[in-house]
Amino acid sequence: MTPTRRRLLTLMTAWSLAACGPGPVPAQDTPALPADLRPQANAAFDAWLSGFRGRAAARGISPAALEAGLAGAGYLPGVVRRDRTQIQTRRSFEDYLSIATSDARLARGRAALRRHGGTLAAIEARFGVSRHIVAAIWGVESAFGERRGRIPVVSATATLAFDGRRGAFWEDQLIAALRILQAGETTPDGLRGSWAGAMGHTQFIPTSYLAHAVDFDGDGRRDVWGDDPADALAATASYLARNGWRSGLPWGEEAGTGPLSGRTIRPQAGGPRFTVTRNFDVLKRYNNSDFYAATVGHLADRLAGGGPLRGSFPPDANGLTRADRIAVQRALAKRGYEVGPIDGVIGPASAAAIRDFQAAQGLAVTGQADRALLARLQ
Ligand code: CA
């Protein structure tokens, strides 16, 4: 979720004066969160929170909603750690695309399209946004509902507001989270999301939820958190429609492979080029990134039955192509190392496996896949 989306938001829907109504989300029968995502004592955080209480009251959060929302909330060190890590690690477009269009992700997406075809058709009819585009955003944001996020949003946004990097932004998100509770849209236990406060199937941050969430199934609640994706998918389509999505216009295509002409973009130097339309810019209103918009567009095409990209990517900074990186992963897996998915993306599991292998071989431990490592493994 991006500043772009934040800027668009207008305040806001009316909220009731009730503190917390009945919540749509049942208690989640999932493993406990890791220790660094459970509240930890932090005196500086507590001091910040007492100041925040006054600011929240001044912005219309009732005492009852404030107490209910903050009960059990606290400082989550793991959220700060993830925020820092995100700044340092930036995936290439090739990696981003490989993850989003892996065979497993595509299979899950096709199953989701079959299972929720009626809902997606109804959303397409109402908002004029292709079901494949809506499904692709669902796929990129939460792997079709598999990773909706289970970190308490009040604690996550409070931690980030306290931590201070973009503190005003996060305090706005915290206030919005408390408004969601005050309106009885869900319970404090139900108000869960990613470490960055992005909630549910299509990962709306709290301010986006307030501005754009939709009760599409008509049960009286705007439920982006539960198993049924209808409300979240409708909110996504509604958001795109409001930002100018043109019904029937493609997002774009790989340059030179179809009828489109005009503006082209290349998200990664030396990689495939895409001819894009105004709808590509609308996708960027969801997340202001060429990586993101091209990945959503390509995933939508794959879900609609299209094939993989024809263009290729150049070797990475370590001189390896995706095929080379897959060869590294396969060779390590064959030796018994746990590399994670064999997808050509050197993520944390693959890097750990490489470090273990390097240590066992008496090599310099870098965790990097490079030509010397590949040669050693072969
Ligand atoms: Ca609903």
Image: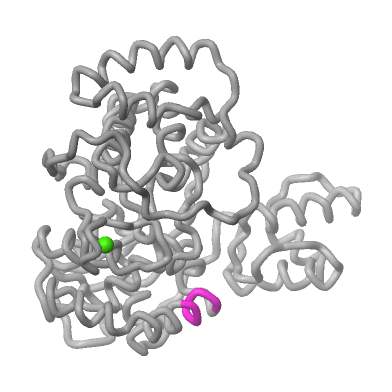
Question: Residue at 20% of width from left, 79% of height from top?
Answer: 122
Question: Residue at 19% of width from left, 23% of height from top?
Answer: 59
Decide whether the magenta segment is chiefly helix, strand or loop.
Answer: helix
**Image: magenta residue range:** 104-108
Magenta segment includes 106: yes
- Which of the four quarters of the rendered structure image does ligand 1 lie in? bottom left
Measured as percent of width and height from the top left, residue 356 is found at: 82, 52
Question: Residue at 45% of width from left, 47% of height from top?
Answer: 194
Measured as percent of width and height from the top left, residue 56 is found at: 26, 21
- Give whichever of 161, 329 is nearer the camera: 161
Give the answer, above or below, for where 35 lies relative to 271. Answer: above
Q: Relative to residue 128, is residue 99 drawn left or right?
A: right
**Quadrant in the rendering for residue 164:** top left
Give the answer, above or below, for where 3 lies relative to 55. Answer: below
- Give whichever of 268, 215 is nearer the camera: 215
Asked whether residue 300 is in view, the answer is: yes
Q: Relative to residue 99, is residue 8 drawn left or right?
A: left
Magenta segment includes 109: no
- Give whichever of 151, 254 is nearer the camera: 151
Give the answer, above or below, for where 180 lies relative to 145. Answer: above
Check the image and tell me how it is coloured: one colour
Question: Residue at 72% of width from left, 49% of height from top?
Answer: 367
Asked whether residue 295 is in view, the answer is: no
Dividing the image into 4 quarters, which one contains the C terminus? Answer: bottom right
**Quadrant in the rendering for residue 229:** bottom left
